[in-house]
Image (cartoon, rainbow, N blue to C red):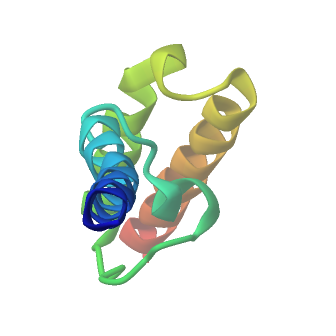
Amino acid sequence: MKRVAMLVMALFMMSVSIPVFAADKATAAQKDECLLASKDCKDATDSIHEKIQKLQGEIKKGTKVYSVEELNKLNAKLKEANDLLDSLLKH
């Protein structure tokens, strides 16, 4: 009975740890959901320059990370940020 209980506990512990290891590997080429869809924006106090740099960096990742639709959305946000910066600099 102890063996069965220990086996069940070991299987449970292994099943809980697998998603954690998978999440670590996904961070290398992960989408920036804050820029893409305003999700997970804990510290979203970037200046316009920082936002433009982040958008450019995410766009450079290309189709390895983002779909074509998501890249179009990021390009539109980049254009919007550049237009905002231009309008601020004109005044």
User: Residue 42 versus residue 12: which sits nearer the camera?
Assistant: 12
In percent of width and height, residue 84 lies at 52, 65
Q: Position of residue 65 (x, y in %)?
A: 48, 26
Q: Quadrant of residue 45?
A: bottom left
Which quadrant would the N terminus be assigned to in this image? Answer: bottom left
**Left or right: residue 82 compared with residue 49:** right
Which is nearer the eye, 35 or 15?
15
Can residue 52 be seen in this snapshot? Answer: no
User: Viewed as shown, does residue 89 lie left or right of 76?
Assistant: left
Up-down: is 53 above or below 42?
A: above
Residue 41 seen from this side: yes
Q: Where residue 41 appears, x then y in whole percent? A: 43, 77
Quadrant housing the C terminus? bottom left
Instruction: Name which residue lies at 67% across and 36% down.
Output: 70
Q: Vertically, is 9 above or below 58? A: below
Instruction: Name the side, left or right, on which 62 lies relative to 73.
Output: left
Q: Quadrant of residue 4?
A: bottom left
Q: Residue at x 40, y 52 (%)?
A: 15
Name the one closer to the observer, 82 or 27: 27
Which residue is at 36% across, 52% downward?
Answer: 11
